[in-house]
Amino acid sequence: MTDRKKIAIGVLALLLALGCSNQGERSAQDQVVVRVDNQILTLAEFNEYFETISLSLDSENAQDNNAAREARVSFLLQLVEEMIIIRRAEELHLSISAEELDEAVREIQKDYPQPDFEDIFLKQAISFEAWKERLRKRLLVEKVMREELLKEDSVTVEEMRDYYNRHREEWSRGEEIRARQILLPTEDQAKEVLQSLQNGETFSTLARRHSIAPEAQFDGDMGYVVRGELPSSLEAPLFDLKPGDVSSVVKTPYGFHIFQVIEKRETPVPDIDESIERIKQEILKGRLETAYRPWLDELRSRYDIEVNTETI
């Protein structure tokens, strides 16, 4: 997956749609959903944060009360973990400075030339300042986890060689495809664009004109991808295409896609020298995953935590 695609998914996952409530609703909206020591999460805040998740639910799941309820509870539990880790940040006197936050925003903006980046917020009616606050919290969580769980971040040559020998076959990229996509927010828009393609308009022109994905400025070019790099909802329809083929409209949690495969090729297994940084990151990721749950459970036992799932 290209860096542009990874950033795009990360950005969309952070977007917050801010809702309004009238005076009569405020007392209910002020209900406390989660308390972690001195931190609280109100129902209004939860609903603001969850709005981005509801935007990614497909219409069928959104109308399924059980699925919608499960999604809300699952997201609430994620927020509880975030609040626990932010509570730990207070104890460690860790924070995200304005400079760190601005730098992170600039890194994301690099892949969204003006006015593309601003358009994301305008199209979704999202508060940029609220988005930055969610980004700040994510950065703080990452900082605490690095501080607590990756105090030893060195990886020996022997560890890297052993990891490479055990996983090299998994890294055989096999068939690799280069593809374009057009991403639309609604099915009706996607069908109209597909009809334009069938009427002879070029994929690149329509991608630049209509796609809301960040690679739209590059004619919709996603670069080269292999199996396992994309969510299954994107991968399955994409890899069934032949070079030059255009897909039908594909619905995913991200919107409505139209794909075109440009090229397919076979790629060899990378040698160890090409993979040093990847190997190191995978080893550190494994350490993090192993240590995370026991560490979080210990923090849970330390703090006074109340979670009221009935209010959501």
Image (cartoon, rainbow, N blue to C red):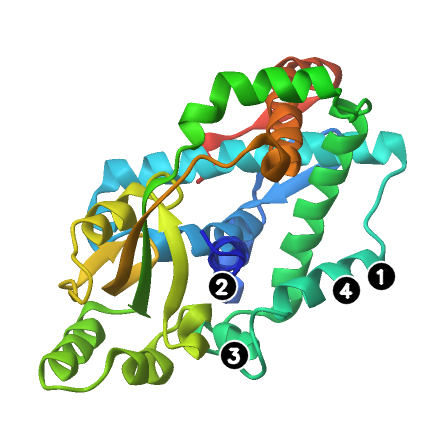
In the rendered structure, which disc, 1 or 2, sits on the residue that comes first in sequence?
Answer: 2
Counting from the top left corner in percent of width and height, residue 78 is at 53, 34
* Amino acid under disc 2: Ala
* Amino acid under disc 3: Asp
Residue shown at 79% from the left, 25% from the top: 154
- Looking at the picture, does residue 176 appear above or below residue 158? below
Counting from the top left corner in percent of width and height, residue 7 is at 54, 57
Counting from the top left corner in percent of width and height, residue 171 is at 44, 32
Residue shown at 36% from the left, 54% from the top: 56
**In the figure, residue 302 lies in which quadrant?**
top right
Q: Is mark 3 on a helix, strand or loop?
A: helix
Task: Using the numbered discs, state the Cα–Cα distance from disc 4 to disc 2 in whole angstroms.
Answer: 21 Å
Residue designated by label 1? 99
Residue designated by label 3? 116
Task: Using the numbered discs, state the Cα–Cα distance from disc 4 to disc 1 in whole angstroms.
Answer: 5 Å
Question: Which numbered marker is on residue 102?
Answer: 4
Task: Using the numbered discs, state the Cα–Cα distance from disc 3 to disc 2 in whole angstroms.
Answer: 18 Å
Q: Nearer the viewer, residue 41 or 29?
A: 41
Circle nearer the viewer, 3 or 2 = 3
Residue designated by label 2? 17
| In contact (CB < 8 Å): disc 3 and disc 2 | no
* Amino acid under disc 1: Glu
Task: Using the numbered discs, state the Cα–Cα distance from disc 1 to disc 2 in whole angstroms.
Answer: 25 Å
| In contact (CB < 8 Å): disc 4 and disc 1 | yes
In the rendered structure, which disc, 1 or 3, sits on the residue that comes first in sequence?
Answer: 1
Q: Is mark 1 on a helix, strand or loop?
A: helix
**In the figure, residue 39 lies in which quadrant?**
top right
